[in-house]
Amino acid sequence: MRARVSPSIRKRPFARGQAGASKSLQKALRILLYMGDNGPALGVTQLASGLSLNKTTVHRLLHAMEKFDLIERNPESDRYRLGLKLHELGTRAVESRTLRTEAHRFLVELSRATHETVSLAVAGLGGVVCLDRVDSRDSVINVRTPIGARFPPHCTAAAKATLAYLPEDEAEAILSIMGLTAYTPHTMTTMAEVKKNLREVAERGYALDRQETERGLSGVAAPIWSGDGQVIAAVGVAGPTLRFRGKELARKIALTKETTAKISASLGHPLQS
């Protein structure tokens, strides 16, 4: 009997001409959604027939997704099922929604205390995403990452404060996907430089952006910890470089770390003495 295909899967095209739309990506997503509706385990022939795709194409996409633990293959039956990475990502998605609700009031307080723009960043598959942002009328910034957009991972404080605590292979994968674009003469553009900087971030507990994304713009960020001791996000403060020097920088570092400690505590992480 042929497995059921929900209309939302069979008729889920991307907008025509949408920039960056990938036919292979669309097919891979259709496979994941189909398996979610018709699992728990399916073979290549079933998937190809159910989705009207070429068997070679299905096998190639399954093999690619298997490398990222999105798909698991049973070597005895040669059937595929959804991988545990999807559970992890789903858990992070739920955490993100709770996180934004818990963090927003603290972001507002931090923006008022520093008179700067404050952002909340979370790591996801393929990048570090801006989950929330509070703008300050006292801070003129040309580069503002919209909510839902990705931060350049190698040169923004918020992204670096998140990547620094990921497993090295995950951090390197994100850096490789997003690239090491040189935005200013201060931008680090080699993997060795960025990795060294991330180790320093993890050691001192906060990250800095020293005009690495935009001339005249600097920032500081610190990580947010979950109740089980994992870094799940970061809070970043950004503004004119003249206001991120000496005692003023030290004050903003302290305020940012104080804020992330409060958010972490609200998520069940014990306050540090």
Image (tube, rainbow, N blue to C red):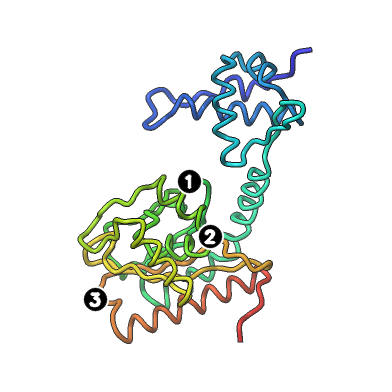
Classify mark 1: residues with Cα within 10 Å, few (<14), some (14-19) or many (20+): some
Amino acid type of the residue that numbered disc 1 sits on in the rendered structure: Gly
Secondary structure of the residue carrying tag 1 is loop
Please give the residue where the numbered disc 2 appears in the rendered image.
Answer: 166
Please give the residue where the numbered disc 1 appears in the rendered image.
Answer: 126
Amino acid type of the residue that numbered disc 2 sits on in the rendered structure: Leu
User: Is 28 located above or below residue 265 in the figure?
Assistant: above
* Mark before the other along the chain sequence, 2 or 3: 2
Please give the residue where the numbered disc 3 appears in the rendered image.
Answer: 242
User: Is 89 located above or below residue 136 in the figure?
Assistant: above
Image quadrant where residue 51 sits: top right
Task: Say which residue appears at 24% left-offset and 64% top-offset.
Answer: 186
User: Is 63 located above or below residue 172 in the figure?
Assistant: above
Give the number of marks. 3
User: Is 128 located above or below residue 258 in the figure?
Assistant: above
Classify mark 3: residues with Cα within 10 Å, few (<14), some (14-19) or many (20+): few
Q: Quadrant of the N terminus?
A: top right
